[in-house]
Amino acid sequence: YEIMPSLVGSEMCIRDSSYPGVLTGSPITDMKITLLIGRAHLKHTEGGDFRQATYRAVRHGLLQAKSVLLEPWYDFRLEVPQSQVGRAISDMQRLCAEFEPPQTEGENAVITGFAPVSEMQGYTLEVASYTRGLGSLICMPKGYLPCHNAEEVIEHIGYDAERDLENTGDSVFCSHGSGLVVPWREAASHMHLESGWKPENCLLYTSPSPRD
């Protein structure tokens, strides 16, 4: 991928910046950026161009990549009376949880697994209610995993990456001494350098809410 900033300026820009994803505008997580090649012009390149080129190049890459929306998940341990295990399994399926078969501990059944945080909200009160205080639910943060209803979330947020002018992936080239804005889809045909890097599969991850 062609990037034209100075090495020092671009590295500082990358480290100090948070880049929004292209699915919902949410922060990018676990992304590695490598500067492969670049070139400046003695006459037309100015200091601010380096930082701006880095922002646009990263955004350009995001628009070309296949992104995956992430969401926070819980590890959970659900303990209920044996008489309520059917209800508990039904609830876990409804809450899009992934879980192991129930294990017997005395007069209770224990179900362990993991589920989206968004679906588990308020379920502790449900457990207390249908078990009449005899059940318990313990949840611990598991981390970020692919969103269980990504299409629904993306549609609800309605983010349009190509209309986000503050985070544009369009490029600016010099033409006859002045700046020429080139849409990101057409930028490759205007580039002066070829990196030789052509990834077959590239996944980028975004989370619908910032990490704590």
Image (cartoon, rainbow, N blue to C red):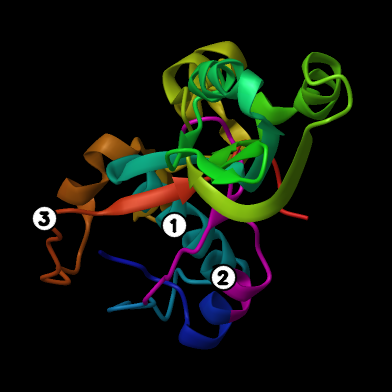
Mark 3 and 2 residues: CB-CB less than 8 Å, in contact?
no
- Residue in view at x 50 percent, y 64 percent: 30
Foreground mark, 3 or 2, reads 3
What residue does disc 3 label?
200
Q: What amino acid type should be assigned to the residue bearing mark 1?
A: Val
| Circle nearer the N terminus (3, 2) | 2
Say few, some or many: other residues with alpha carbon within 10 Å of mark 3 (under 14 / 14 to 19 / 20 or more).
Answer: few
Q: Is residue 198 above or below residue 61?
A: below
- The span shown in magenta is 12-34
Q: Position of residue 104 (x, y in %)?
A: 55, 43
- The answer to whether marks 1 and 2 mark residues whose Cβ atoms lie closer than 8 Å is yes
Measured Cα–Cα span from mark 1 to mark 3: 18 Å
Left or right of 62 in this view: 198: left
| Image mark for residue 14 | 2
Real-space CA distance between mark 1 and mark 2, rounded to the nearest whole angstrom: 9 Å
Q: Quadrant of the C terminus?
A: bottom right
Say whether disc 1 or disc 3 marks the residue closer to the N-terminus. 1
